[in-house]
Image (cartoon, rainbow, N blue to C red):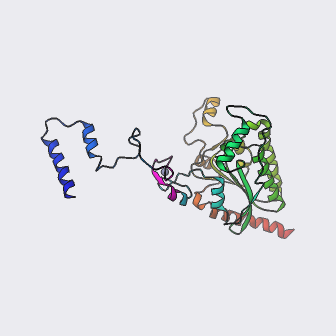
Amino acid sequence: MATRTSTFGKKSLTQETSDTPPPINVVKSETTFVKKPKIGSNPGRKREIPEGVWTKCEKCSNMLYDKELDENLKVCRHCGHHFQISARERIHSLVDTCSFEEMDAHMTSVDVLQFKGVAAYSKKLESYQNSTALKDAVITGVGKIGVFKVALGVMDFSFLGGSMGAVVGEKLTRLMEAATDKSLPLIIVSTSGGARMYEGMFSLMQMAKTSGALAYHARKKLPYISVLTHPTTAGVMASFASLGDLILAEPGAMIGFAGPRVIKDTTQAELPPGFQTAEFLMDHGLIDAIIHRRDMKDRLINYLDFLMEGQRQVIALG
Ligand SMILES: [Zn+2]
């Protein structure tokens, strides 16, 4: 401690007695050992951080310890930014342990159009199946959330941008039909870039198919809660994701149909600040509540408790 003080004192003395001030870069390089540089202040300098241990927050740029981030359900403890999470992590965060029974786990897409782009669709499917350990962009099944048995569908953005092709549409439709048959409430957690272009019209058909199945579920006076996560857009937002009896969202989620640039070019109008965020859409009445990921399960239980009371009365009346 004494050495450090005296060194610092010497340096100040040198600066005071000198006729010309030292170049700025010299002062900077000599003082960095006492002044902690701000993260992100020197983008040219590489930080030596072991891979797979730390993650940089996309919003506030703070470094987050991966283990801590996982424990915090992948929410930044500094700014509350909600990172994307996989479908399996989401199910784990919502459903009671060991209560989830997956449906149609082995259903896989077929390359009906023989789509050839930069990479063939069949090759893309294979590579995403290997990298994500998923068969397609949604997991469906029945599980328990609190005391409630629910039909739950969770999309995964890491599989081809959560795009909806024939498998996503079919799995969700079967889930909706199972919920209708068994008189179960339905919860779908969405994240999607929209319809899957590799399947052309077959993917667009899924919008009508899922919406139709939801109408049968609604006729039986069963509740459907739609949870929108970052990002939920295009064909998914324009069908089942926006048809919830309750529409919930995670903070900061980007939600919309077309992208802001397309809308701006088409309408030739300036878009308001915050356009297409969950907060903006809540202010304008599309979303019923914005809920932090750590509170989502408890809030779902509260809503189900309220909504299923009506259902119990319907059953009691025969
Ligand atoms: Zn952050």
The answer to whether residue 102 is visible is yes
Determine if residue 285 is in view: no
Query: Residue at position x 81%, y 58% from top?
Result: 178
Q: For the magenta stretch, what is the residue range?
A: 50-69
Q: Find residue 27 and report its horizontal and vertical position in percent.
A: 25, 41
Q: Nearer the viewer, residue 48 or 32?
A: 48
In which quadrant of the rendered image does the N terminus lie?
bottom left
| Residue 144 within the segment the image draws in magenta | no
Q: Is residue 24 left or right of residue 187?
A: left
Q: Residue at x 61, y 36 (%)?
A: 260
Is 63 covered by the magenta stretch?
A: yes
Instruction: Tell me: residue 309, above or below residue 210.
Output: below
> How many discs mark residues in the rendered view?
0
| Foreground residue among 26 and 227 | 26
With 113 as the anchor, is 274 left or right in this view?
left
Rendering quarter of residue 113: top right
Compared with residue 177, is residue 45 higher up or lower down, i.e. above or below?
above
Q: Quadrant of the C terminus?
A: bottom right
Position in image of residue 103 (x %, y %) = 77, 57
Horizontal and vertical percent position of residue 232: 65, 45
Residue at the far right: name it: 318
Q: Position of residue 17 (x, y in %)?
A: 12, 41
